[in-house]
């Protein structure tokens, strides 16, 4: 057995090796009425048998860990008044009205929280206590490879009583808990079994030390202030652990290439198997030899998960699905795309795609040395369309089923009907993906990881609530940006201190808001000059000038209407074309739209007199518009789901649109996409309108229906009249157009 020794712990503020980080500024401590969170540290090193000579350097190294008290972090998080109304104090179940279908959304709607509460309440002293599931997550991150391999291994902590919408918005719902040491060894020791075992035990010992203050709260209720302003008795429980597969191997004690959720053999992961449990692992360790447990069950007997220190914590059950790495970067990019890429490149070359917000163009192909998660997500949006018509239909059906599966599991709300659709998509995928073996692309059979999402959704709610993307996004604010702002010398100490100060400032902001001192935005809005019609005001206006006036002798009676000065466009979201049309007549010629002036006047009438009766026939009764135009040829709206920050980019109050008609009354059976064609008037002119931006539900990505023809990279899309509505463009489009 590999053993460890602990070098005496010492407090962050008395850290004397080199330059210690400064304490929190006193002003921040006094402003915030909550416990200050300090960083503590300890060291671990190898304490097992040493070789007589050629001692590996990793055996003689002391590994340093920095951490905060998790109990204090939870106390501060739980007392955050911003969470009031966005937090659940007890597990519950939710059903749809009428048909009584169970709904899964926030974490406390899952069966795991319900079962944990039943287990906890067997102790009468815990009755009426608030159940606090503590969720942990970790992921190594590299901040720079140019100035040397700068790697960090942060651990994050959260309480999953808070609702998913708060968690997704990074609204102080996820805190930095610790920085773990990253054991490294020379290449010749990289595959040393002793070194691998040491790394696993190092992680277990470190996590046990870091989480030690939670152990009392698992058995005995702790009195804590909650967002509603009342004090509750809280009982903790170690909840799901968010990590990629390699860290799941490290955490759980399973052997690499084995499934962390079931006992399926590495040679047949697709078939699944009985669920792996901590109790089963204990029996295997007691009854079998180390070799038999490893070879036959994929269990490393030298590793005891850190969850063994906590009551009712089963690490095998608590491992969460990794959508980003397992599905998007794993099964999609590393398997399906690789199996199809040679076929496409040899037979059909490259295809062109209409521009769309979030899509990148690669005229010379996509031979990347490293794929990022966003690269795979972008490819998923258009890959089905790219291969349709150029590969056997069963391959298209495989991708169709896989994409349906990926988008279904990322919905914000999942019901029993959704679970049925999820199972159907997975069954279709397994049925159609045999085509790759039949055509000789993948002849050695399949051993893809079994998908346990249906069971995990029932346990923990929607996968969006436990997504790896949340952890990777937190890296940006808690590690990467702070590293960039440091002077790069012993940057970790600067990162620690800055995180302390930012946490205190965030707490101060919440406290100021609670006492009516914030938000200042409302005060700013009250100071803005008022105009005749605020409905036409917007950050970016299609019709805009410093003092634009709209007048009509019949309706406005000589009065004028002024629009606010438009704010500076956000670079990357809008594109103002200079040197083009700046007036209605010029824009009419540029767009070849003779009725543009009438359309604009009709739009203005609808906005000004939306409660009035329609104007008489003819244009004299419509408001006149002769002022200059400011035209944005490109404006985007941004809708982001999962863990990313949600919001809307630059928008404008009115838009000139071209209508489309359905080709059929249902989506295309092969691709699952709606098909549309350009809508024309009876005289074959374009069916166009000027509409208010608020009447646009969502932007649409249209993909030309190329059919079987060869598509060149340089192409005029105006020659196409039939299009697919790409409901894989983003998750909002999927929910609206599926």
Image: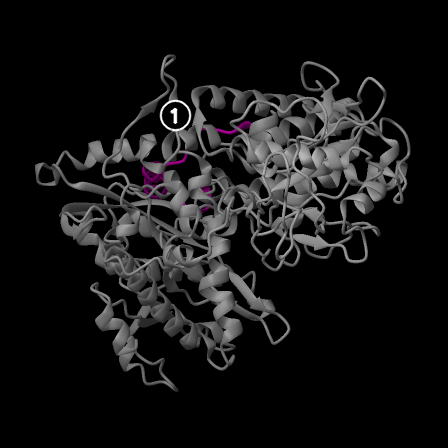
**Secondary structure of the magenta portion, mostly?**
helix
In percent of width and height, residue 595 lies at: 78, 32
Circle count: 1
Relative to the observer, which residue lies in front, 188 or 27?
27
Query: Which quadrant would the C terminus be assigned to in this image?
Result: top right
In percent of width and height, residue 162 lies at: 32, 44
548 part of magenta stretch: no
In percent of width and height, residue 145 lies at: 62, 70
Does residue 212 appear to the left or right of 203 in the view shown? left
Does residue 686 appear to the left or right of 173 in the view shown? right
Location of residue 20 with respect to 507 vertically, above or below: below
In percent of width and height, residue 34 lies at: 21, 63
Q: Which residue, as the protein is rendered here, is positioned at the far left?
A: 125
- What segment is highlighted magenta in the picture? 270-292
Residue named by callout 1 = 103
Relative to the observer, which residue lies in front, 503 or 310?
503
For the question of whether residue 48 can be seen, the reply is no
Location of residue 448 with respect to 173 vertically, above or below: above
């Amino acid at each position: 057995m590999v053993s460890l020794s602990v070098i005496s712990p010492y407090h962050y503020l008395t850290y004397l090796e080199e330059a210690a980080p400064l304490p929190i500024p006193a002003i921040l401590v006094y402003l915030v009425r909550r416990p200050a969170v300090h960083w503590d540290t300890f060291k671990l090193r190898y304490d097992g048998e040493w070789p007589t000579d050629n001692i590996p350097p990793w055996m003689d190294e002391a590994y340093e860990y920095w951490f905060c008290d998790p109990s204090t972090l939870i106390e501060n998080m739980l007392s955050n008044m911003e969470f009031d109304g966005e937090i659940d104090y007890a597990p519950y179940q939710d059903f749809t009205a009428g048909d009584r279908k169970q709904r899964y959304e926030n974490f406390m709607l899952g069966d795991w929280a319900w079962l944990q509460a039943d287990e906890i309440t067997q102790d009468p002293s815990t009755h009426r206590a608030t159940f606090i599931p503590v969720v942990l997550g970790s992921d190594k991150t590299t901040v720079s490879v140019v100035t040397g391999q700068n790697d960090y291994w942060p651990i994050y902590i959260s309480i999953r009583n808070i609702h998913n919408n708060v968690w997704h918005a990074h609204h102080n719902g996820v805190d930095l808990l610790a920085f773990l040491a990253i054991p490294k060894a020379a290449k010749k020791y990289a595959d040393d079994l002793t070194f691998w075992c040491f790394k696993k035990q190092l992680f277990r010992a470190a996590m046990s030390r870091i989480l030690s203050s939670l152990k009392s709260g698992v058995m005995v209720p702790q009195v804590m202030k909650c967002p509603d302003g009342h004090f509750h008795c809280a009982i903790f429980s170690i909840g799901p652990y968010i990590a990629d597969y390699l860290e799941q191997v490290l955490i759980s004690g399973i052997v690499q290439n084995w499934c962390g959720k079931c006992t399926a053999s590495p040679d047949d992961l697709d078939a699944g198997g009985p669920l792996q449990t901590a109790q089963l692992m204990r029996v295997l360790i007691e009854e079998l030899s180390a070799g038999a447990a490893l070879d036959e069950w994929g269990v490393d007997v030298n590793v005891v998960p850190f969850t063994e220190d906590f009551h009712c914590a089963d690490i095998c059950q608590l491992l969460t699905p990794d959508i980003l790495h397992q599905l998007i970067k794993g099964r999609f990019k590393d398997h399906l795309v690789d199996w199809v890429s040679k076929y496409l490149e040899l037979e059909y070359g490259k295809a062109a795609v209409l521009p769309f917000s979030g899509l990148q163009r690669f005229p010379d192909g996509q031979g990347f040395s490293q794929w990022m998660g966003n690269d795979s997500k972008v490819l998923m949006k258009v890959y089905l369309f790219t291969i349709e018509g150029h590969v056997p239909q069963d391959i298209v059906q495989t991708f169709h089923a896989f994409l349906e599966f990926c988008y279904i599991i990322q919905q914000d709300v999942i019901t029993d009907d959704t679970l049925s659709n999820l199972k159907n998509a997975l069954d279709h995928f397994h049925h159609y993906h045999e085509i790759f073996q039949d055509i000789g692309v993948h002849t050695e059979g399949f051993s893809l990881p079994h998908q346990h999402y249906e069971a995990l959704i029932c346990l923990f709610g929607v996968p969006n609530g436990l997504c790896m993307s949340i952890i990777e996004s937190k890296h940006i604010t808690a590690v990467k940006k702070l590293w960039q702002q440091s002077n790069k010398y012993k940057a970790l100490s600067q990162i620690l201190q800055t995180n302390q100060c930012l946490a205190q400032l965030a707490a101060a902001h919440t406290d100021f808001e609670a006492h009516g001192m914030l938000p200042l935005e409302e005060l700013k809005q009250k100071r803005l000059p008022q105009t005749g019609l605020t409905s036409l005001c917007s950050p970016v206006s299609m019709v805009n000038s410093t003092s634009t006036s709209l007048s009509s002798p019949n309706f406005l009676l000589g009065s004028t209407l002024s629009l606010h000065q438009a704010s500076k466009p956000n670079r990357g979201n809008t594109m103002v074309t200079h040197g083009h049309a700046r007036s209605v007549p010029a824009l009419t010629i540029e767009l070849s739209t003779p009725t543009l002036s009438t359309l604009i006047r009709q739009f203005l009438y609808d906005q000004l007199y939306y409660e009035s009766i329609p104007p008489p026939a003819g244009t004299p009764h419509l408001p006149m518009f002769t002022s200059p135009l400011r035209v944005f040829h490109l404006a985007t709206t941004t809708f982001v789901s999962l863990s990313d920050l949600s919001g809307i980019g630059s928008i404008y109050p009115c838009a000139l649109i071209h209508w489309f008609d359905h080709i059929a009354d249902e989506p295309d059976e092969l691709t699952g996409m709606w098909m549309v064609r350009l809508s024309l008037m009876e005289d074959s002119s374009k069916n166009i309108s000027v509409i208010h931006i608020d009447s646009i539900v969502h932007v649409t990505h249209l993909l030309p229906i190329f059919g079987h023809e060869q598509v060149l990279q340089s192409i005029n899309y105006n020659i196409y009249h039939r299009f697919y509505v790409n409901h894989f463009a983003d998750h909002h489009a999927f929910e609206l157009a599926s």
